[in-house]
Amino acid sequence: MLKYELKKILNKKLNRILLAASLLLMVVFSIFAIGSFRAVDTDGETVTGFSAARIMVDDKNRWEGELMPEVIEKSVESRLAGDWQSTSDIIYLASKMLVGEFSDLDDYEAILSANSAQIASIYDTYHDNLRAMSEEYGDTPEKQAFLMEQYEKIDTPFIYEAYDSWDTMLMYATNCGLILILVISFITAGIYSEEFQYRADSVFFSAKYGRSKAVLTKICSGLLMATLIYGIGMGVLSAISFSVMGISGASTAYQFYQPYSVYSVTFGQMYGILTLGGYIASLLAASVSMLIASKTKTMSIAIAVPAILFFVSPFVGRAMPFRTFFSLTPDQLMNIVNCARIPYIYQVGSIVFRQIPFIIVFYAIIAIVLLPFVYRNYHKMLLK
């Protein structure tokens, strides 16, 4: 029966068009990601296109290795001598380590004016700034202790390897994930509403397994389609992009991009967290669209609700004063990069937890909990 339901989904012309279009968009976005690089080659010429990413990474990887204070000082000297391209990542990180997250100076080159003593003690300064972060965002002793515990997991001195491909893909994967969620919502909504749309409900309802196995099969087909669409889409995007740009920087600390992030992970791990969040969002969108479709028998409403959750909610959240509430809404699953930037932490009793692990686990549970309601709604229709 599962094979039959999948065949029904794929036999619909509109569904095939959507799947082909989404796959094409993944290819297009991967080309955009690759083409977004501009680099200066060894002859001093500006290069764009497919070779630019490799040229930039190779140039930056002259500094590959342990980022000791003396290496930072050498990169400062190189930057002052006119080497902007290869030193940009190190100069940015070192400047933020020096001035802190709360500095009034919007100066990403503060390290260039630092003296040798300041550079030599830069990691001490950084740890002092981390303590300041724990006091700023920890409004209870438990939160402060929790933040410091997380910050102590950050390994220093940092190990550097150019991470430009991962930095770029974090942005493109977020946008592509939203497109895939919209496609998933459309296709899964049609799994239930089409029985009423084509007046096939009476035949379906009178079938031997119409009240049990067939309903469960529809639910399984919806979840399977969500998994396949998201997995193949993100797989194509990642495979094309990384095969051209390379995977340099996969093990580089995410703190190079967000020096005061409370998440002590690498760029490769952050990309994995982002794609996991997108997958949970896909399952949630599928569950919600199937639930609404089984309740209303209307495909348009079933598509609109996930669209509101993931596309409209972010704009509402910016206009409303309830920051805590909107930091835990489903759209945050597709906003992992910004979630990692600000140390959102919450406390219930003596338990303190971070935003990203909570929303991933919470909405995975919600996606599963909604499925019995989908079954019950559709089963009720069969009995009417």
Image (cartoon, rainbow, N blue to C red):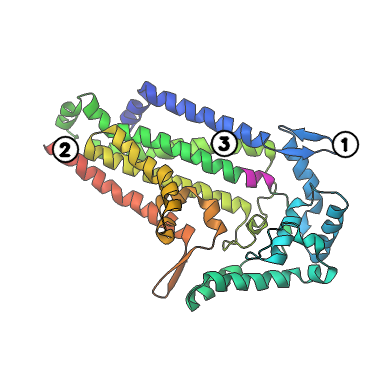
The percent position of residue 148, horizontal first and vertical second, equals: 57, 72
Q: Secondary structure at mark 3?
A: helix
Which of the marked residues, 1 or 3, is nearer the chain's N terminus?
A: 1
Who's the residue at 36% across and 32% down the image? 187
Who's the residue at 65% across and 70% down the image? 129
Who's the residue at 45% across and 28% down the image? 19
Please tell me how crowded label 2 is: few (under 14), some (14-19), or many (20+) other residues with Cα within 10 Å: some
> Where is residue 168, by image quadrant?
top right
Specify whether residue 212 is in view: no
Residue sitting farthest toward the bottom: 141
- Determine which residue is flagged by label 1: 43
- Determine which residue is flagged by label 2: 381
Please tell me how crowded label 3 is: few (under 14), some (14-19), or many (20+) other residues with Cα within 10 Å: many
User: Which residue is nearer to you in this view: 290 or 300?
Assistant: 300
The percent position of residue 56, horizontal first and vertical second, equals: 76, 42
User: Which residue is nearer to you in this view: 139 or 380?
Assistant: 139
> Where is residue 104, by image quadrant?
bottom right
Specify whether residue 9 is in view: yes
- Determine which residue is flagged by label 3: 237
Task: Work out how far the residue at label 2 is from the one at label 3, CA to CA, in angstroms.
Answer: 40 Å
Q: Is residue 114 magenta?
A: no
User: Which residue is nearer to you in this view: 299 or 269?
Assistant: 299
Task: Work out how far the residue at label 1 is from the one at label 2, CA to CA, in angstroms.
Answer: 71 Å
Query: Decide: marks 1, 2 in contact (CB < 8 A)?
Result: no
Q: Of helix, strand and loop, which mostly describes the magenta segment?
A: helix
> Where is residue 287, by image quadrant?
top left
Q: Give the magenta-colored segment's residue range.
A: 164-168
